[in-house]
Amino acid sequence: GMKRFLREEMDVNVEVLHDRPPSHFKPTGLIEKHELFKRLNLSSKFSKNLTSDQTLFTETINGVIKERKGRPRLIMSSTSWTPDEDFSILLKALEEIDGEIGREVLCIVTGKGPEKEYYVNKIKEMDLKEIDIMTVWLEASDYPILVGSADLGVCLHTSTSGIDLPMKVVDMFGGGVPVAAVGFECLDELVVDGKNGRVFKDWKELKGILKELLGKEGEGELERLRKGVGKGLRWEENWDNIALPVINECLEKCKEKKAREEDSTGWYVLALGVAITIYQNSYMWGASALMFWYALEKFQERSRAARAMLWLLMLLVGSVGFWNFYSQERAS
């Protein structure tokens, strides 16, 4: 989208470097997940009957950490709580599917912003049975672990320009998590509907997606979408594949331009030497200067030592011509 915009509106040809997740975003293992939720100690309404060996999603049996039977489905979303993300879409969809999933669903929302208090109050007013919605603020080191623990990500980002893509989806894909995202122009550069996620336009469509994917019958489809996310490129690989060749090409062109500018200086010096020798009727020296000039042009891509030798020869030609001129002037 951005490449097309710059080409059509500004007549600029560019290579677009899409955001890709750094390497610390990855699917979370059971040990990391167990330690994270022990550390967070979430006060969810689903936590009431947990033992000291259990978290909402994991448990320790004979010293071995395993996934807890009957664990909730985990929806994860992050937001800056601004007007360009209508969070009422997610709240309405969750309210509508409550009691229809047949299992517990925990929705964790991370982030800070101006509209957070408004939505927190709305969440408190909701009377949900199977669903719990929690807002949390995480340490930077815990955020990738939470992302990689989710079953499904939800993105409510809408682009005013239509050409910027949400970084939160990139992070979720890094964690191997499929995403349900509100649609806008160029989103398909990131979320491909039915391959690595689902796209919706309102709360009704999101309701259908959540109901399908979070229930027991949706486990197969959720796994298929997770495979569609795949491993993908990381930021380092993406930089090496896209940005680095462009930068190297620019540096090479700059190097060639500088070489041409340096050669032009040599041509001016040679021209001066030729002019001096011709003025003195020293045709042999003039012919020699022309030969050196031709040789220098042929040696543009040769070794630095060869070019330095040619420069010395040119200097000699100019010096002799100038000395002849000076001697004749003194004699006259």
Image: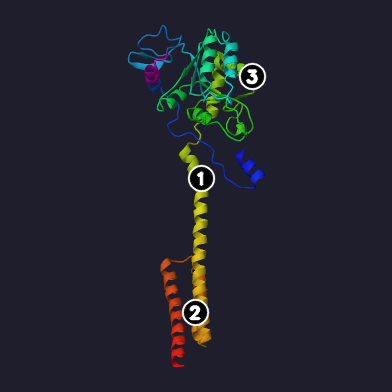
What residue occupies the far left of the structure in this picture? 63
- Do the residues bearing badges 3 and 2 touch, measured as CB atoms within 8 Å? no
Query: For residue 273, which numbered disc appears in the image?
Result: 2
Q: How is the image coloured?
A: rainbow
Q: Eyeballing the image, is 67 above or below 13?
A: above
| Circle nearer the N terminus (3, 2) | 3
Residue at 52 percent of width and 53 percent of height: 250
Name the chief secondary structure element in magenta. helix
Which type of secondary structure does the marked residue at label 1 adopt?
helix
| Residue nearer the viewer, 147 or 274 | 274
Which type of secondary structure does the marked residue at label 2 adopt?
helix
Residue of label 1: 243
Q: Amino acid at mark 3?
A: Glu
- Left or right position of 331 against 4: left
Q: Of circles 3 and 2, which is in front?
A: 2
Can residue 300 be spotted in the picture? Answer: no
Q: Which residues are magenta?
A: 34-42
- x and y percentages locating residue 130 in the rendered image: 52, 9
Residue at 37 percent of width and 17 percent of height: 38
Residue at 50 percent of width and 40 percent of height: 238
Which type of secondary structure does the marked residue at label 3 adopt?
helix
Q: Is residue 40 magenta?
A: yes
| Circle nearer the N terminus (1, 3) | 3
Q: CA distance from mark 3 to mark 2?
A: 81 Å
Q: Amino acid at mark 1?
A: Ala
- x and y percentages locating residue 262 in the rendered image: 49, 66
Q: Is residue 216 magenta?
A: no
- x and y percentages locating residue 117 in the rendered image: 51, 17
Q: Eyeballing the image, is 191 above or below 330?
A: above
